[in-house]
Amino acid sequence: MQFGATRFDRDTGQLLSASGEIIALSLPASKILAVLAANQGQAIPKEDLTSAATGTIVTDDDELIQFIAEIREALGAEGHALIRPVPGVGYRLTVRSKDRSREKGNTLKYLGLAVALVPVVAILVQLLLWAL
């Protein structure tokens, strides 16, 4: 999953820079990022994030806040915009994926191609009907 200049490899749990270098992230922070990435756009309860990080449910939010801060710092300037608190629930990861932008661009490209081919298909159909 791409986060601006950084990329999170869900298989390895590693955060990578644009040049492919590993960005240091503790194991609990990596597990939290994996949960957020797998549920992108959804509010994840604090308890679920803490459980993913530590294997237990902790009632103290301080530990979770530290892990979220670590992830945000590792993500760089856009870290705070990517991981947002959801009051009364937990946190949400919101990403504008380059892949999604590309998909949208490809969809528009193919739509344009389809529109351009309509007159050609109409002419071919008329020629076929005329030949019969």
Image: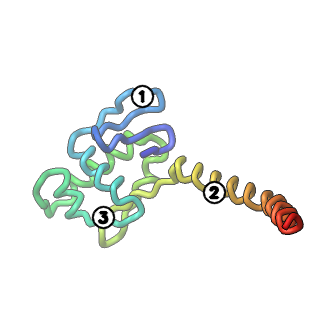
Question: Residue 62 location, x and y as percent?
Answer: 22, 55
Query: Is 112 displayed left or right of 94 in the figure?
Result: right
| Residue type highlighted by circle 1 | Gly
Q: CA distance from mark 1 to mark 3?
A: 29 Å
Question: Residue 18 location, x and y as percent?
Answer: 48, 32
Position of 87 relative to 38 (above/below): below
First along the sequence among labels 2 and 3: 3
Mark closer to the observer (2, 1): 2
State the image quarter where residue 7 is shown: top left
- Number of numbered discs overlaid on the protein picture: 3
Local SS, label 2: helix
Asked if labels 3 and 2 touch by Cβ distance under 8 angstroms, the answer is no
Asked if labels 1 and 2 touch by Cβ distance under 8 angstroms, the answer is no
Query: Is 115 displayed left or right of 81 in the figure?
Result: right
> Between 92 and 63, which is closer to the camera in this rendering?
92
- The C terminus appears in which quarter of the rendering? bottom right
Q: Which mark is residue 94?
A: none
Q: CA distance from mark 2 to mark 1?
A: 29 Å
Query: Is 57 displayed left or right of 1 in the figure?
Result: left
| Residue type highlighted by circle 2 | Thr
Report the residue marked by disc 2.
Answer: 107
Report the residue marked by disc 3.
Answer: 44
Question: Residue 123 location, x and y as percent?
Answer: 86, 62
Report the residue marked by disc 1.
Answer: 20
